[in-house]
Amino acid sequence: CNEGVQLSLNDCLYVGDAAGRTENVKRKDHSCADRLFAINIGITFLTPEEHFQGVKQQKFNMPEFDPHKVDENAETFEPSTTKVPQYPQEPKKQQGHWSLGLLTSMNDPELLIEKDDKIVIIKDKYPKAHHHFLILPQENIPSLKSVKPTQISLLKYMESKASILASKYPNSEFRYGYHAIPSMARLHLHVISQDFDSTCLKSKRHWNSFNTKYFLDSTDVIRSLEKYGQCDTSEASKDLLNEQLKCHKCSYIPQNMPKLKDHLKNHLQM
């Protein structure tokens, strides 16, 4: 450590601005953090003016609390009947890159709908419609490009689960499909109602990800795998996310998302 150079605290000094300067000093840094740090590790402290310009020691204020004056034999709390405040435990923060969030959500009991040895069904954490679910395989399949013909039966099973789930909401129209270029790790089938009535639906990219060729219907994905042995995503450029907004129910072309969302209310009332 330190390439073998021996150090002596007596020969060390710490130069810092946070020196507890009094308010009549021109500089406005009145914190005492640097001075206290030097005191705590037992070395000499100097301000930049004292060290580099040779000025005399300036006036400074130490904090009101001095740990040296605390009676080590005193009660921890005075009076001794003082209650220690209890604070709720902070929720654990999700670790890792945001794109791995689905792997965490798969094990979130608040999001879980159903699971078996093949799939997990969860609520979308940020739903883009009144009903928005995700069906994920237990098997580690990163994306559509990773799907093999031998896994077609799994995709058909996921689609059948989507159909059963949608049937529980007979008053809602659903689509089942995949984002051609997903942002989240682990293949996931969207089961989404076509009302798009959600506060989480905020941007053009959100809308176009479900209402352009960027969104691939499950039946088309399975058909492509059966015919070509792979899923063709060549037409699903990310440029589709920036296409002009257009209502999915009629020919209305809104100027922005707020106007589109207002327009969608008309279809909800039909």
Image: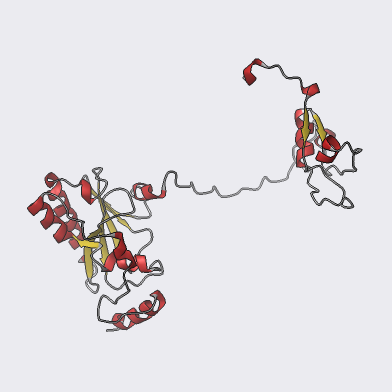
Q: Is residue 160 above or below residue 41?
A: below
The residue under the point 80% across, 34% down is: 74
Write the residue at 17% across / 57% down: 159
On the rendered image, what quadrant is the N terminus found in? top right
Q: Is residue 22 above or below residue 249?
A: above
Q: Nearer the viewer, residue 7 or 68?
A: 7
Residue at the image position 75 percent from the left and 29 percent from the top: 41
Inspect this view and state whether residue 131 appears. no
Between residue 110 and residue 138, name the one nearer to us.
Answer: 138
Judge from the rendering whether residue 263 lies leftward or rightward of residue 171; answer left or right. Answer: right
Residue 11: image location, x then y, percent: 79, 22
Relative placement, left or right, of 150 versus 30 is left
Rendering coords of residue 208 (x, y %):
31, 67
Q: Is residue 268 visible?
A: yes
The quadrant of the picture occupied by the C terminus is bottom left
Measured from the top left, where is residue 122 in percent x and y? 31, 55
Residue 43, by quadrant, is top right
* Residue 134 position by quadrant: bottom left
Q: Nearer the viewer, residue 261 or 28?
A: 28
